[in-house]
């Protein structure tokens, strides 16, 4: 079976499984479908779905392309012990239905800012996975007062060979072409809109990264779909950054290494930033 045929089959599965770039990892999870914790907020022209768990300092969770709150099923119960966890379905994904034609990371970052305003949250910690990491970076760039500490895993700032292995760069073109040949139902149109993000964005500049004021933990797998060199570059250009490359890991760091991920992130959120220069680098 050729790679192109496999991608066409994947495109069809994408539509009928909720167009997530991730497999349905937590099929029996209540997270993302919990009437007791779920709410809708009128944010910038659409109803944004979110769930709240726990009490304490606010912690915003932002999923990746085509994903949903469900993707954080391994994190929500852990962090809800110490934080007020706000897990959100991004615009046009999960239960946050948006029938508009356009979609961008910039729009989505403004959505999260709008949700925080609706909830009267002046500042919060943020964990973003994949595209959610891109959204987290943009939220910290455009609304620095809203982000206390930021954690991104599998984020990227460009969409070319500096960020992706060559074989991964082929996928968006083939998928979008395959989706365009399917009957153009509302589900297919939405899947195309969401997947165009992977093809067209983000376009974050290094000076923009340099403007991020908050302490940031930049995470990636050593076999991530995002090149480790790109992850290092992101960390190198954020003034108060820490870098963590997980060995023997792909893109799903927070799933495949759930306990290690949760404990490391919790420690980061509780630990002040330490500047290490000169001879202190020996320690």
Image (spheres, rainbow, N blue to C red):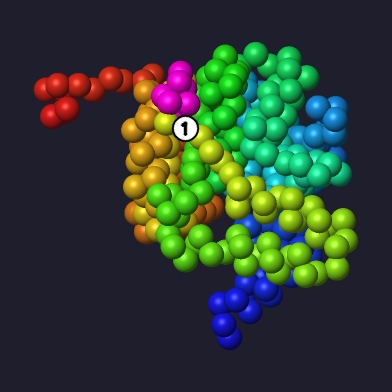
Residue at 69 percent across and 66 percent down: it is: 177
Q: Is residue 193 above or below residue 210?
A: below
Percent of width and height locating residue 262: 49, 40
Q: Secondary structure at mark 1?
A: loop
Disc 1 marks which residue? 205
Residue 13 seen in render:
no
Q: Report whether 107 appears left or right of 130.
A: right
Magenta-colored stretch includes residue 210: yes
Question: In the rendered view, does 140 fall on the left or right side of 216?
Answer: right
Q: Quadrant of residue 216?
A: top left
Residue drawn at x 40%, y 49% is 162
Residue 113: x and y, percent? 68, 23
Quadrant into which the N terminus falls: bottom right
x, y (%) of residue 167? 47, 66
Extent of the magenta region: 207-213
Q: Residue at x 85, y 30 (%)?
A: 45
Task: Give coordinates of residue 191: x percent, y percent.
Answer: 75, 56
């Amino acid at each position: 079976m050729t790679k192109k045929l496999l991608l066409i089959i994947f495109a069809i599965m994408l539509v009928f499984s909720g167009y997530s770039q991730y497999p349905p990892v937590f099929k029996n999870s209540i997270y993302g479908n919990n009437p007791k914790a779920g709410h809708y907020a009128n944010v910038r022209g659409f109803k944004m779905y979110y769930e709240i768990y726990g009490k304490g300092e606010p912690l915003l969770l932002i999923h990746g392309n085509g994903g949903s709150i469900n993707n954080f099923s391994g994190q929500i119960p852990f962090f809800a012990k110490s934080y007020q966890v706000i897990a959100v379905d991004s615009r046009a994904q999960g239960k946050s239905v948006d029938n508009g034609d356009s979609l961008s990371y910039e729009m989505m970052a403004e959505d999260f800012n709008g949700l925080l305003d609706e909830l009267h949250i002046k500042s919060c910690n943020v964990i973003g996975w994949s595209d959610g990491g891109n959204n987290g970076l943009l939220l910290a760039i455009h609304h620095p007062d809203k982000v206390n500490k930021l954690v991104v895993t599998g984020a990227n700032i460009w969409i070319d060979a500096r960020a992706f292995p060559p074989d991964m760069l082929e996928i968006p073109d083939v998928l979008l072409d395959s989706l365009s040949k399917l009957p153009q139902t509302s589900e297919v149109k939405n899947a195309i809109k969401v997947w165009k993000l992977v093809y067209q964005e983000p376009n974050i500049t290094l000076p923009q990264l340099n403007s991020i004021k908050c302490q940031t933990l930049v995470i990636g797998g050593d076999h991530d779909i995002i090149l480790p060199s790109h992850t290092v570059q992101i960390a190198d250009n954020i003034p108060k950054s820490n870098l963590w490359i997980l060995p023997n890991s792909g893109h799903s760091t927070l799933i495949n290494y759930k306990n290690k991920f949760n404990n490391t992130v919790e420690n980061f959120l509780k630990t002040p930033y330490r500047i290490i220069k000169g001879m202190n680098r020996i320690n």
